[in-house]
């Protein structure tokens, strides 16, 4: 099978502000842009910021809606964490270890962009937990 890319479109109310956050802040590579949309490359995946006139409001918790990446190397997760700390991006949830000492253990942090879109970035200590470990029921934090 050839390489398959993930695509996600999300709402923003200002293209220039979205570009500043995602390119200058998060480190995405910009793609095509016009007055109503901006294509972004996030680690080889396509994000598209679409302009909306609808009012955007924050979620009460990190659930149900967020998107992000799972790093397969802990050093890559740590490098992004250092980058976003240096750029002083807003954390919705600070870095932490979930399920420490268990086969589901992973490191995670959440960011919130200026438009209330939530992003989670994580690294699993045991790669089989990404899709497997069916004998465990834990998923995320309690809402």
Image (spheres, helix red, strand yellow):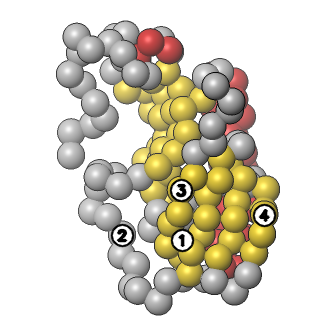
- Circle 4 crowding by C-alpha within 10 Å: few under 14, some 14–19, many from 20: few
Q: Mark 3 — residue? A: 8
Residue 132: x percent and y percent? 36, 16
Label 4 secondary element: strand
Q: Nearer the viewer, residue 33 or 139?
A: 33
Mark 1 or mark 4, which has the lower sequence index? 4
Q: Is residue 87 above or below residue 72?
A: below
Say which quarter of the image contains residue 140: top left
Q: Is any atom of residue 91 visible in this view?
A: no
Query: Mark 3 and mark 2: span between their CA atoms?
Result: 19 Å
Number of disc labels: 4
Label 2 secondary element: loop
Say which quarter of the image contains residue 133: top left
- Circle 2 crowding by C-alpha within 10 Å: few under 14, some 14–19, many from 20: few
Q: Mark 4 — residue? A: 31
Residue 62: x percent and y percent? 34, 52
Say which quarter of the image contains residue 90: bottom right
Q: Mark 1 — residue? A: 114
Q: Mark 2 — residue? A: 58
């Amino acid at each position: 099978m050839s390489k398959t890319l993930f695509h996600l479109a999300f709402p923003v109310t200002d293209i220039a502000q979205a570009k500043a956050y995602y390119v200058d802040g998060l480190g995405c590579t910009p793609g095509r842009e016009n007055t109503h949309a901006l294509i972004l490359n996030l680690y080889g995946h396509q994000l598209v910021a679409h302009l909306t006139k609808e009012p955007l409001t924050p979620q009460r918790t990190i659930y149900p809606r967020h998107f992000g990446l799972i790093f397969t190397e802990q050093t890559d997760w740590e490098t992004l964490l250092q980058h976003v700390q240096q750029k002083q991006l807003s954390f919705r949830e600070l870095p932490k270890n979930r399920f420490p000492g268990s086969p589901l253990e992973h490191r995670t942090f959440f960011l919130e962009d200026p438009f209330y879109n939530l992003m989670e970035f994580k690294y699993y200590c045991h790669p089989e937990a990404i899709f497997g470990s069916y004998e465990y029921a834990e998923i995320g934090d309690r809402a």
